[in-house]
Image (cartoon, grey):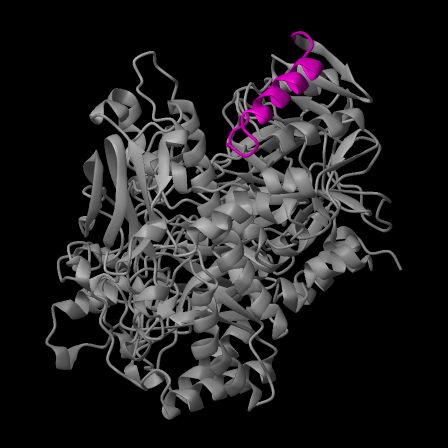
């Protein structure tokens, strides 16, 4: 039987999809909705393992079984798949929370077991933060296992003489006079050395004749950074951290370097009391005593029962203690109800900048291959050997610290979790507090099963002018318009073979002022940076008895059953799951692999367009470990064991490179790789010095035979390019940009995944304005499809194939996104679309504005009238009735209207105009779904009838208006209860259906 199009729509309409709440209905694609290919089937109904999860904070143990069950069942019902349980005290930022069950008490353990049992029943994954508060530590961490700072003291001796005396101790904070950012530093920075567990590392004597042996001027200004004792805000950008340590110390003619043969190790001649017995040779000698103190840093907002010192991040003993005293408890208690945590988590590094460990010399020998002892005076600015040699030693020292962090902390933590059949999740590369903590971010993340970062919402992130490239991090919470660490997380996931790139999502100080529609642009930005697993920050566990909106965390977008719009939250979670499903499929597509060098700290900058690369290409960044141990060549492409591949390896603009790296580059070239970058002149470290430099020069001379910017230098099967443009090299390889747009005013971001069955592009409009533009995809010979993760529908678009690419002209509304797929085999039964709502060349045309009066019903429990008539649509916050003006919650709009014209041949839409903040629409008792994002429009072709029509719209606003109204009332008259303070004169938020509400025609 063949049905006319209108009849078909009336019969099927949205009936089969009314729970997949739509923003727009496909016009010519409904017949394809039943296609049974697995990719689309899982896109429509995503599997549980692609659902979003959330931080689930238990503050002061103020939880009960009713609230635990309510939360977990609500998460499951709305489409969430996991929780990360964090136990903490209070709510940060003055958001105090009353005491509940004390952490680790039998009462608390019973609640924990109940939560684990409920999660098992509901098939909700549970991860656990292995600390109270953050970062990692507790009362079981003794001073000797805590984070350390090195200290140095000097004394000048003239020989010959027999010296037998106590050496002076270092000052308690010598070299740390500019500390300003580590958490709680004022409580411990000035403690006397006797309270800081001072311990010695070594004593050496260097032959000196005064301060001329030390660095001065601009080189001395870099010492704090190079010697790893510079403090910096977590707002600092990656280049601000890397710049000082990458700036070389050049030798100067006036340098009075201390010969390394003029260093005497006196460590064995000093007793435990600090007494040195030494027969001083002739000459002037400076004795340098190197030791270390605990930083004194403690956990943040930890419960008293588990509060204490932070661990030593460079010695696995601290992780062992944490696992023994806390980890095993979580495992054992969960086992009593037949389950276990899915993973343990280590939160973002926010512990200042520890820079030493008691086994530093042993670790240095293991990682760098030589004894660091003679070089330790460099830490105080002495020129040992030469300024260049001193510089290289400090890089070796910083690299050793970074290696210890990766292996002793993150690597060992992973090993312990794996021994117990669990995974590990780490926010292992910041943003850090302090920003200068010496780490190899990629290596840290590579030790994690679930590498994670974070992204924030700016104080006024809904205003596009606050998100531009020129705004500071404090204003935008972005670096040059992009999230600070998410590209680093994604690169680590791709280069270390992890399928998931996670992020703590939506952290902010914007209490109850966000909702699904305001979050989408930040989410899509992170998706295009490579994130494919969000952990929403945050959901506070609350007791129903504590009222609404309840106690909340001081820093996080609030996601729990207490938010006003929770009833309408499911479509947002469906959007997340569908997007994440596609963004986990296959492999990320990148043309360029940037090698980030071996200088520590080693951080990856935010996603950006390298000036030599330009727009349209994507990339990953790798570190030395990946280049040496994981990177190979196959069929002329650079490949990793897990399936990632790249066309071009780009080297850093540096003249320093380890011999092993240069040898590997030579091997890659001989096997067919294409490499671009400058020739190195020296090694970056001192292992094997000076022979290593001679080997570098010899290899570089053999490879970089002559400048070859265009055709390149042929090395074996490969080619080496330098100087020149990365883009020109790719174009010379006939590698067109992967994605471009023709509209220069458009800002369309993208990410590309490839599978054996399809090429998948996720594209998003980054501007707060609708845009029409031609999109060019590097794909030919396939029929494209448009997949909408909001509505779970797909279309065949109009397209052209030209010059090796597919051109699709698209209309994208404010912050709108769409997935463009190129299946290997064309989908059967999917209509070929004529121009549709994604591609229309003309605007929707107005048929009828639904002006006049509306009947509204508010919930009297929250102060609104049970029934009221608005003569015209009006912002609740400007209404003269205080019950409406301060109302928070749901109101029902109802209206009858007549449609007297003949039903047009095309499609008809209801445009809602402005909605504050989320709504659900019925027309003639047909549920048209929840509308939560632009375009605020829903198709009504089927339900609309000629004559009288009944329209019902449920609208939900946000909590602040009620909280502001309550702030002016005596406590006993308030309807709300929370620990977040609002003032009675705080500005009210626009609320309600603001319209105009218009019926629009569309000719398909």
Tell me if residue 918 can be seen.
Answer: yes
214 vs 426, nearest the viewer: 214
In the image, taking residue 992 as reference, residue 161 lies left or right, namely left
The vertical placement of 193 against 429, above or below, is below
The vertical placement of 459 against 386, above or below, is below
Q: Residue at x 32, y 47 (%)?
A: 434
**In what quadrant of the picture does the N terminus appear?**
bottom right
Picture coordinates of residue 653, whole percent (x, y): 52, 22
Residue 639 occupies quadrant: top right
- Residue 39 included in the magenta stretch of the image: no
**In what quadrant of the picture does the C terminus appear?**
top right
Residue 94 occupies quadrant: bottom left
Q: Residue at x 75, y 29 (%)?
A: 667
Residue 262 occupies quadrant: top left
In the image, taking residue 409 as reference, residue 637 lies left or right, namely right
Picture coordinates of residue 126, whole percent (x, y): 54, 74
Q: Residue at x 51, y 46 (%)?
A: 365
550 vs 665, nearest the viewer: 665
Picture coordinates of residue 313, whole percent (x, y): 42, 57
Picture coordinates of residue 91, whole percent (x, y): 28, 68
**Magenta segment, which residues?**
683-707
356 vs 563, nearest the viewer: 356
């Amino acid at each position: 039987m063949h049905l006319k199009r209108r009849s078909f729509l009336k019969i099927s309409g949205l009936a089969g999809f009314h729970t997949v709440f739509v923003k727009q209905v496909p016009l010519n694609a409904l017949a394809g909705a039943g296609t049974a290919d697995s990719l689309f089937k899982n896109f429509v109904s995503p599997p549980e393992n692609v659902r979003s999860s959330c931080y689930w904070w238990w503050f002061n143990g103020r939880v009960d079984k009713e609230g635990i069950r309510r939360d977990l069942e609500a998460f499951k019902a709305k489409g969430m798949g996991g929780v990360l349980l964090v136990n903490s005290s209070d709510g940060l930022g003055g958001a105090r929370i009353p005491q509940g069950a004390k952490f680790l008490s039998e009462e608390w353990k019973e609640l924990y077991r109940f939560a684990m049992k409920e999660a098992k029943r509901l098939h909700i994954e549970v991860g656990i933060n292995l600390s109270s508060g953050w970062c990692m530590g507790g009362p079981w961490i003794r001073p000797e296992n805590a984070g350390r700072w090195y200290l140095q003291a000097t004394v000048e001796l003239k020989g010959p003489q027999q010296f037998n005396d106590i050496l002076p101790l270092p000052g308690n904070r010598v070299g740390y006079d500019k500390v300003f950012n580590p958490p709680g530093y004022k409580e411990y920075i000035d403690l006397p050395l006797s309270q800081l567990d001072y311990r010695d590392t070594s004593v050496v004597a260097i032959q000196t004749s005064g301060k001329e042996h030390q660095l001065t001027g601009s080189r001395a200004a870099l010492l704090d950074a190079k010697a790893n004792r510079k403090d910096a805000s977590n707002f600092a950008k990656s280049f601000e951290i890397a710049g000082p340590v990458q700036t070389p110390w050049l030798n100067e003619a006036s340098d009075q370097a201390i010969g390394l043969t003029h260093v005497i190790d006196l460590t064995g001649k000093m007793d435990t009391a600090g007494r040195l017995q030494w027969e001083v040779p002739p000459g002037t000698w400076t004795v340098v005593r190197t030791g270390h103190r605990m930083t004194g840093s403690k956990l943040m907002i930890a419960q008293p029962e588990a509060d204490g010192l932070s661990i030593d991040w460079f010695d696995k003993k601290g992780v062992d203690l944490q696992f023994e005293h806390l980890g095993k408890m979580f495992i054992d208690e969960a086992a009593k109800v037949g389950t276990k945590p899915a993973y343990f988590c280590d939160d973002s590094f926010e512990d200042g900048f520890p820079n030493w460990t008691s086994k530093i010399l042993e670790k240095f020998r293991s990682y760098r291959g030589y004894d660091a002892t003679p070089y330790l005076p460099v830490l105080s600015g002495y020129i040992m050997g030469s300024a260049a040699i001193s510089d290289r030693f400090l890089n070796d020292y910083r690299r050793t610290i970074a290696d210890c962090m990766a292996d002793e902390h993150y690597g060992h933590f992973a090993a312990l979790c794996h021994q117990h059949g669990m995974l590990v999740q780490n926010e292992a590369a910041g943003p850090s507090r302090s920003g200068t903590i010496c780490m190899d971010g990629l290596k840290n993340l590579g030790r994690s099963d679930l590498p994670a970062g974070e992204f924030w919402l700016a104080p006024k992130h809904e205003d596009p002018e606050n998100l531009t490239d020129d705004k500071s991090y404090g204003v935008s919470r972005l670096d040059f318009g992009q999230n600070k660490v998410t590209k680093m997380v994604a690169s680590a996931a791709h280069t270390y073979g992890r399928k998931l790139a996670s992020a703590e999502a939506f952290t902010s100080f914007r209490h109850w002022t966000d909702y699904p529609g305001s979050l989408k642009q930040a989410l899509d930005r992170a998706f295009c940076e490579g994130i494919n697993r969000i952990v929403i920050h945050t959901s506070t566990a609350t007791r129903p008895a504590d009222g609404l909106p309840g106690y909340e965390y001081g820093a996080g977008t609030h996601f729990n059953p207490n938010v006003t719009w929770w009833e309408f939250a499911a479509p947002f979670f469906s959007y997340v799951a569908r997007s994440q499903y596609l963004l986990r499929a296959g492999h990320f597509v990148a043309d360029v692999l940037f090698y980030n060098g071996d200088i520590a700290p080693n951080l990856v900058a935010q996603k950006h367009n390298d000036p030599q690369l330009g727009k349209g290409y994507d990339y990953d960044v790798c570190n030395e470990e990946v280049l040496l141990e994981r990177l190979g060549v196959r069929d002329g492409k650079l490949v990793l064991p897990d399936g990632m591949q790249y066309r071009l390896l780009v080297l850093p603009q540096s003249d320093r490179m380890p011999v092993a790296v240069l040898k590997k580059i030579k091997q890659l070239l001989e096997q067919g790789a294409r490499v671009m970058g400058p020739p190195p002149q020296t090694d970056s470290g001192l292992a094997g010095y000076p022979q290593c430099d001679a080997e570098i020069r010899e290899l570089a001379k053999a490879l970089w035979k002559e400048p070859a910017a265009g055709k390149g230098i042929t090395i074996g099967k490969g080619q080496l390019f330098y100087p020149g443009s990365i883009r020109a090299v790719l174009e010379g390889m006939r590698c067109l940009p992967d994605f471009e747009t023709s509209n220069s005013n458009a800002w369309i971001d993208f990410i590309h995944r490839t599978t054996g069955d399809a090429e998948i592009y996720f594209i998003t409009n980054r501007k707060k304005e609708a845009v029409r533009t031609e999109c060019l995809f590097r794909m030919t010979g396939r029929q494209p499809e448009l997949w909408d993760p909001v509505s779970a529908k797909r279309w065949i678009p109009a397209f052209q194939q030209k010059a090796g690419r597919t051109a699709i002209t698209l209309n994208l509304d404010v912050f709108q996104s769409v997935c463009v797929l190129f299946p290997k085999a064309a989908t059967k039964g999917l209509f070929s679309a004529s121009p549709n709502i994604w591609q229309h060349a003309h605007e929707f045309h107005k048929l009828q504005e639904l002006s006049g009066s509306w009947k509204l019903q508010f919930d009297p429990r929250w102060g609104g009238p049970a029934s009221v008539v608005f003569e015209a649509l009006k912002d609740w916050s400007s209404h003269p009735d205080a019950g409406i003006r301060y109302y928070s919650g749901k109101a029902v709009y109802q209206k009858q209207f007549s449609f007297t014209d003949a039903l047009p041949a095309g499609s008809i839409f209801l445009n809602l105009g402005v909605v504050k903040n989320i709504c659900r629409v019925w027309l003639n008792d047909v549920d048209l779904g929840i509308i939560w994002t632009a375009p605020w429009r829903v198709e009504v072709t089927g339900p609309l009838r000629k004559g009288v029509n009944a329209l019902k719209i449920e609208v939900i606003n946000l909590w602040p208006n009620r909280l502001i109204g309550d702030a002016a009332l005596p406590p006993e008259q308030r309807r709300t209860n929370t620990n977040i303070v609002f003032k009675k004169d705080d500005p009210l938020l626009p609320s309600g259906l603001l319209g105009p509400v218009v019926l629009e025609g569309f000719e398909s």
